[in-house]
């Protein structure tokens, strides 16, 4: 395909050895990482010589792909109409480290086992589903974060300046931390061996069947805190406060774990499932 007298090239690469680390740094391409019926890691991406190029290195069990610092107004103009996704297919037993960075673009990670997953976007949605990992760290300045059917052997940290943060059917051996400046936080059927911290400046916090082995700390400046805890009220020492809004959660003492709910402007409605 020609692109203003430049050739668009779909590059495909199959690694020669077992890969234990995958690092991708991009600008605005969509990044898709998934497991497949492959023996070694495979990667494909789009290049346009002189306008949109990458440097790929495989060395010592590490695979890195990094966007070259080439600016092209024409490429940026036409890029949304191109199938320019970076696609990575890993073996089912990958078990390595995945680090993804992009300034503007979506990231989808699904169906893989990893030692650690780290995703950071300046602007773009992030979706992680059906993943088993030792640790998960996700951050985006603007865009939704959706985590579904994930197991973490230690912690999950999810942060966004603006956008929804959603954890669904997720189990964490240690702690869960979810925070944003503007946007809803949803925790549905989340089980944490340690504590759960969720905070937003503008937006509500909704949760169902939240199960923890440690403390629960929920705070919002503008928005409601509503949900259900998979445990007995007597397990928690409860502190709740709202300046403007209905508060149906009575303070109590004596529980080994702490539950703090603070909504400056919004209702607090929390039930216990026993």
Image (cartoon, rainbow, N blue to C red):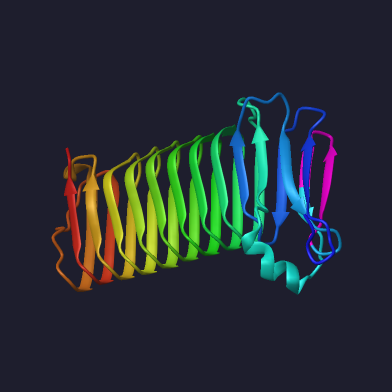
Where's residue 176, x and y in %? 43, 48
Q: Quadrant of the image for the N terminus?
A: bottom right
Q: Is residue 145 left or right of residue 6?
A: left
Magenta-drawn stretch contains 58: yes
Magenta part of the protein: which range?
Answer: 52-64
* In the image, residue 138 above or below residue 130: below
Q: Name the residue: 22% across, 67% down.
A: 241
Residue 95 appears in the picture as rendered: yes
Q: Is residue 194 left or right of residue 153?
A: left
**Residue in front for this viewpoint, 31 or 197:** 31
Q: Is residue 31 left or right of residue 193?
A: right
Q: Name the residue: 66% across, 61% down.
A: 28
Where's residue 115, x and y in %? 61, 35
Number of numbered discs on residues = 0
Q: Name the residue: 24% across, 45% down.
A: 229
In which quadrant of the rendered view does residue 171 lie? top left
Where's residue 117, x and y in %? 60, 43
* In the image, residue 113 above or below residue 183: above
Q: Name the residue: 41% across, 60% down.
A: 164
Where's residue 168, x and y in %? 37, 44
């Amino acid at each position: 395909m020609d692109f203003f007298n430049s050739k668009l090239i779909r590059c495909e690469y199959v690694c020669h050895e077992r890969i234990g680390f995958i690092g991708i740094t991009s600008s605005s391409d969509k990044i898709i990482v998934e497991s497949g019926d492959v023996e070694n890691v495979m990667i494909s991406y789009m290049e346009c010589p002189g306008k949109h190029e990458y440097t790929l290195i495989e060395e010592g069990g590490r695979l890195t792909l990094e966007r070259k610092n080439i600016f092209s107004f024409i490429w940026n103009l036409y890029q949304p109409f191109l199938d320019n996704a970076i696609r990575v297919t890993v073996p089912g037993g990958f078990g390595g480290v995945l680090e993804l960075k992009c300034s503007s673009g979506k990231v989808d990670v699904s169906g893989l086992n990893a030692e650690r997953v780290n995703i950071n976007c300046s602007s773009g949605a992030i979706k992680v589903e059906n993943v088993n990992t030792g640790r998960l760290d996700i951050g985006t300045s603007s865009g939704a974060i959706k985590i579904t059917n994930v197991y973490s052997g230690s912690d999950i940290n999810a942060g966004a300046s603006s956008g929804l943060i959603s954890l669904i059917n997720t189990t964490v051996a240690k702690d869960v931390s979810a925070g944003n400046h503007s946007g809803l936080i949803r925790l549905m059927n989340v089980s944490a061996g340690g504590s759960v911290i969720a905070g937003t400046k503008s937006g509500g916090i909704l949760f169902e069947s939240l199960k923890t082995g440690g403390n629960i700390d929920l705070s919002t400046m503008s928005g409601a805190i509503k949900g259900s805890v998979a445990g007995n009220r007597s397990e928690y020492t409860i502190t709740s406060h709202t300046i403007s809004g209905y508060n149906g959660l009575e303070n109590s003492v004596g529980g080994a774990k702490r539950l703090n709910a603070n909504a400056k402007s919004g209702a607090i409605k929390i039930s216990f499932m026993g």
